[in-house]
Image (spheres, rainbow, N blue to C red):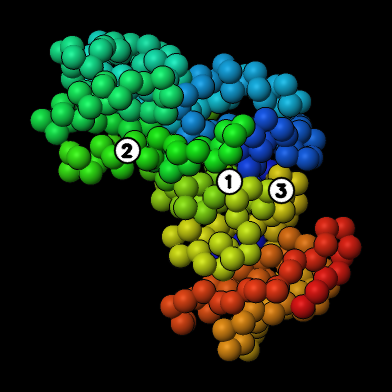
Amino acid sequence: MLLTCADPLGRAYDLAMLDLDGVVYVGPDAVPGAAEHLAAAREAGLRVAFITNNASRPPSRVAAHLTDLDVPAEVADVVTSAQAAASVLADRLGAGARVVLLGGEGLEVALAERDLVAVRVDADADALVTGYGPQVLWGDIMRGAVRIRDGLWWVASNTDASIPTPYGVAPGHGVLVDTLRRFTGVEPVVAGKPARPLLDETVRRVGGERPLMVGDRLDTDIEGGRAAGFDTLLVLTGVTGLPELVSAAEAERPSYIGLDLRALREPHLAPEESDGAWTCEGWTARSTEGRLSVEGRGPEAAWWRAAAAAGWAWLDAEGEPVDVDGVTPPVPGSGGGAG
Ligand SMILES: [Mg+2]
């Protein structure tokens, strides 16, 4: 259920854990306004951590990319699923443990940081870790699969099915995880979102009493944040649009919805229900005979909150998502909108 926060979110929470792709940048480019909104929220006292399921780039490279986009980032502000995977391994096995590495540079750096010894796939080992690594050889994957099947403990950095590349959306590490699962019948321990280790690792490294998870994906950022016990902010600069939002299962619903990172600088009002309609700052949304309609006039973000609340009420009552065909959000900055 959506929450009300009378203070700007960046003041009510002391740590924002920011997903990167679709939140701060899209591919190589910054989300418009992201640098300015983050700078203002940080100036007002908000601590910021950048978290990513991408295990291939070490934090130093991610920090340099952010700094290039005018979002100043120290290496210590960046937490990756590779680091979370190394923590899972080190917590259970202790320093000096030998780990078969099937992944990229990010995982290699993360293992060394926790005093774990990366070994080849045919060497004596206590565990095996996998992560996105385009240079990993198929022969090594085959050998690793057999060792997992025969009982070697397996940790996976993440299960993302896709990864954006300059030539389009391509298979992510999750595709390899599925392949290994199918062959071995073994479930890995997963470090990245929506599993807990990455978020726990972030709080451990960066601190924060009242963390807010900020992301663009319902089934990783929001579901993962909620599962870890944190409040969550969904921003609409990435992969989530109206059809995804009104289809969200209970566990994937955010605490707050904002257009972009300016939401950190604003208070949030939750929609209120009356006679089956949901009203939020001038907008009224209802689901009638399976169709969503939104009427009124008000801030654009409030349109989305009213629409989400009316959509979720329908989903919970009827078991299927409301039809949103032809329902269009207000044009940014117009202050008005269509029904
Ligand atoms: Mg994202």
Occupied quadrant, residue 298: bottom right
Report if the beta carbon of the residue with label 1 is closer than 8 angstroms to ligand 1: yes
Residue that appears at 34% across and 36% down = 176
Dot 2: few (<14), some (14–19), or many (≥20) neighbours within 10 Å? many
Report if the beta carbon of the residue with label 2 is closer than 8 angstroms to ligand 1: no
Q: Going from the N terminus, do you reach mark 3 or mark 2 first?
A: 2
Q: Going from the N terminus, do you reach mark 1 or mark 2 first?
A: 2
Residue that appears at 53% across and 79% down = 314
Residue that appears at 47% across and 34% down = 53
Q: Nearer the viewer, residue 31 or 303?
A: 31
Q: Position of residue 168 (x, y in %)?
A: 58, 39
Q: Nearer the viewer, residue 7 or 202?
A: 202
Q: Label 2, secondary structure: give it.
A: helix
Tag nearer the camera, 1 or 2: 2
Quickly name the residue at label 2.
177
Occupied quadrant, residue 337: bottom right
Residue that appears at 42% across and 24% down = 133
Quickly name the residue at label 1.
215
Q: Position of residue 26 (x, y in %)?
A: 66, 38
Is 210 positioned to the left or the right of 198 in the image? Answer: right
Q: Going from the N terminus, do you reach mark 3 or mark 1 first?
A: 1
Find the residue positioned furthest to the right.
334
Label 1–label 2 contact, CB within 8 A: no
Where 212 sits versus 267, above or below?
A: above
Is 148 positioned to the left or the right of 138 in the image? Answer: left
Q: Nearer the viewer, residue 141 or 159?
A: 141
Quickly name the residue at label 3.
260
| Residue type highlighted by circle 1 | Gly
Separation of residues labelled 3 and 2 (CA atoms):
32 Å
| Residue type highlighted by circle 3 | Asp
Q: Position of residue 128 (x, y in %)?
A: 25, 24
Q: Position of residue 174 (x, y in %)?
A: 38, 40
